Amino acid sequence: MFPKIIRFLYVLVVVLMVLGYVGGVIYGFMTNTTIGLAALGLGPVAVLLYLILVRTWMEIAIVLFRIHENTERITGSE
């Protein structure tokens, strides 16, 4: 059950990051053309790095929960 929650959260984060990126580019062009171009060029790099970070933390959470489940199974305490 936990991996399904993580999968949903990851999709939610991806959608929010894309919306934030589009909003940032629009705001950048409304502010100044140079800022808009910078947001357009550097934004995907920032989004990609953030998504890698989020994915790593979510994978770590899955591993920790599996370790917990396996430890409970080994000790017999549920």
Image (tube, rainbow, N blue to C red):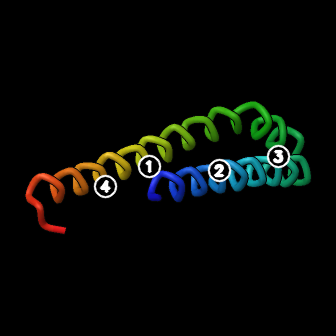
Q: Which mark is residue 11?
A: 2
Which of labels 4 and 3 is toward the front? 4
From the image, tell me which residue sits under label 1. Answer: 58
Looking at the picture, which amino acid does disc 4 mark?
Answer: Phe
Q: Are marks 4 and 2 in contact (CB under 8 Å)?
A: no
Give the mark, 4 or 2, whose residue is nearer the N terminus.
2
Looking at the picture, which amino acid does disc 2 mark?
Answer: Val
User: Could you tell me residue 49's position as x and y percent?
Assistant: 55, 36
Is 16 left or right of 51, judged from the image as shown?
Answer: right
Secondary structure, mark 1, is helix
Residue displayed at 66% across by 48% down: 14
Secondary structure, mark 4, is helix
Looking at the picture, which amino acid does disc 3 mark?
Answer: Val
Q: Which mark is residue 25?
A: 3
Q: Counting other residues with Cα less than 10 Å from the Cα at mark 2, is it few (<14), some (14-19), or many (20 or more)?
A: few
User: Could you tell me residue 9's position as x and y percent?
Assistant: 58, 57
Q: Are marks 1 and 2 in contact (CB under 8 Å)?
A: no
| Frontmost residue, 22 versus 71 | 71
**Mark 2–mark 3 distance (CA, rounded to whole Å):** 21 Å
Q: Counting other residues with Cα less than 10 Å from the Cα at mark 4, is it few (<14), some (14-19), or many (20 or more)?
A: some
From the image, tell me which residue sits under label 4. Answer: 65
